[in-house]
Every structure is written in structure tokens, then in C-alpha cells.
Amino acid sequence: MRLSHFRELMEGEFGPVRAASLSRDHVFADLGGRTVEQAIEAGVDLRRIWRAVCAVYEVPPARR
């Protein structure tokens, strides 16, 4: 997955403002206690990050 596609998924699901806030502020246990932005910087696979976000925010399987 490309970073641009990941950002599109985030914005499509949460809207641009909430996606940006969620990426900066929410700490995910499944990402080692990192935010989305920290996980990206650490080189965590973007699919893993997306799955973690989907699990916490209960994104329906059809949109995962």
C-alpha cells in the first residue's frame, strides 16, 4: 500500500480533519503505543496500521 492510498482511506472513512487529528493524537496499543504518524515514521507496514485503525474504530469489513 502506498502512503497516498493510506491517506485516501483515512480521509474517506473519517473526513480530512478527523483523519489528521486521529493520526496525530490517538495512541494505538496494536502499534506499540504509537500514533499513526509515529508508526509511519518507524516504518510500520501501512496495511498493519490501517488494520489497527479499523479494529479500534470498528470500520465495517466491507470498507477495510
Image: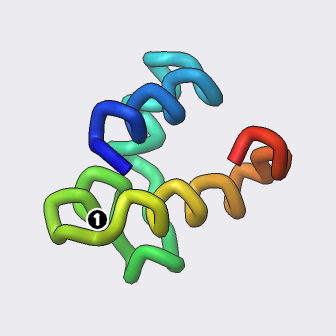
Q: Residue visible at 39% across and 34% down?
A: 5
* Image position of 39 (left or right of 18): left
Viewer-side residue, 61 vs 21: 61
Q: Is residue 31 above or below residue 60?
A: below
Identify whether 38 is placed above or below 33.
Answer: above
In this rendered view, identify the residue nearer to me: 35 or 49: 49
Residue 12 lies, with reference to residue 1, above or below; the image says above
How many labels sit on residues? 1
Q: Position of residue 26 (x, y in %)?
A: 46, 53
| Nearer to us in this view, 49 or 19 | 49
Q: Quadrant of residue 62?
A: top right
Residue under the image location 41 percent in, 40 percent down: 6
Q: Is residue 9 left or right of residue 42?
A: right
What is the x, y in percent for residue 28? 49, 68
Q: Is residue 22 above or below residue 51?
A: above
Residue 19 place in picture, x, y as percent: 47, 31
Residue projecting furthest to the front: 1
Query: Residue at the spot x=47%, y=68% of the render?
Result: 48
Pointer 1 residue: 39
Q: Position of residue 1 (x, y in %)?
A: 37, 50
Find numbered disc 1 in the image and state the secondary structure of the residue it sits on.
helix
Residue furthest to the top:
16
In the image, what residue type sits under mark 1? Answer: Ala
Residue closer to the observer: 59 or 56: 59
Residue drawn at (30%, 44%) of the image: 2
Q: How is the image coloured?
A: rainbow
Residue, far left: 41
Determine crowd level at label 1: few under 14, some 14-19, many 20+ residues with C-alpha closer than 10 A: many
